[in-house]
Amino acid sequence: MSNVLILGASGRIAHRVIERLAGSKGVGLTLYLRHPRKLRNKAPANARVVQGDVMDATVLAQAMEGQDLIYANLTGGDIDRQARSVVAAMKDAHVKRLIFVVSLGIYDEVPGKFGQWNNTMIGEELRPFRRAADTIEASGLDYTLLRPAWLQDEDEVDYEITEKGLPFKGTEVSRASVADLIVKIVRAPELHSRGNVGVNKPGTDGDKPSFY
């Protein structure tokens, strides 16, 4: 049995991950979120729900017990503080494997006019995401950092990845695609171990995403 703790389980990517892992033999889910009523569907049979905030060290520590992998679907201007809380709880619980979603642009890796547009739109918001990524990379954990392009809700799985240090490709990607990559890592935890990857839909290069 592989036990997976999903932090921020009401998120739209997390929703797709939960759907994909619902009923999976050998996978037990813990769905951690502040407001359980925001779960999009009833929790599957292989899941339990824990109400809590990642900044609540006591509740988070209890949720970490017995987990094999943590998937963090978090956001907000304090995501750097949230990352520190998650890392501390994982170390205390001796849990090593972490998937953490951040954002494109935190390394100024988005080229051209799209990079300029991205910085205009979210440049100030990227600073705590960069600090979160730095905290995780320095943690000694077995992490995977995901940097998705601008997210859309098409029902498609079509993506490519770029490694840290390479120019970001494309402008957008579906949440279903990001969820697919997360599920693959859950099922094969060695995949992208100690990795930091951009995720985009091929062929979407341009000045901005198609939905803007």
Image (spheres, rainbow, N blue to C red):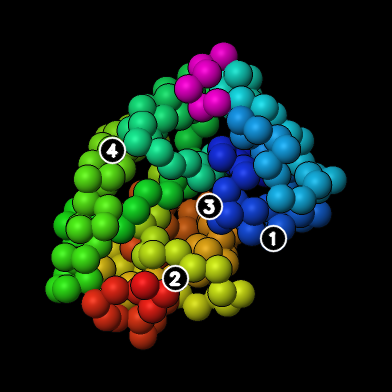
Q: Do residues under tags 1 and 4 come within 8 Å of each other at their CB atoms?
A: no
Q: Which quadrant of the figure contains the N terminus?
A: top right
The residue beneath circle 1 is 20
| Crowdedness near tag 2: few (<14), some (14–19) or many (≥20) residues, C-alpha within 10 Å | many
Q: Which residue is mark 3?
A: 189
| Of pointers 4 and 3, the one earlier in the residue sequence | 4
User: For the residues marked 2 and 4, what is the alpha-carbon distance in whole angstroms?
Assistant: 22 Å
Q: Would residue 66 be visible to someone looking at this image?
A: no
Name the residue tied to disc 2: 173
Picture layout, residue 84 above or below residue 196? above
| Other residues around mark 4 within 10 Å, as few (<14) / some (14–19) / many (≥20) | many
57 sits left or right of 47 in the view: left
Task: Inspect the image, locate mark 4, and give the three-letter code of the amino acid beneath it.
Answer: Pro
The residue carrying pointer 3 sits among few (fewer than 14), some (14 to 19) or many (20 or more) residues within 10 Å by Cα, namely some
**Residue named by callout 4:** 128
First in sequence: mark 2 vs mark 1: 1
**As displayed, is residue 129 above or below residue 210?**
above
Residue 124 sits in which quadrant? Answer: top left
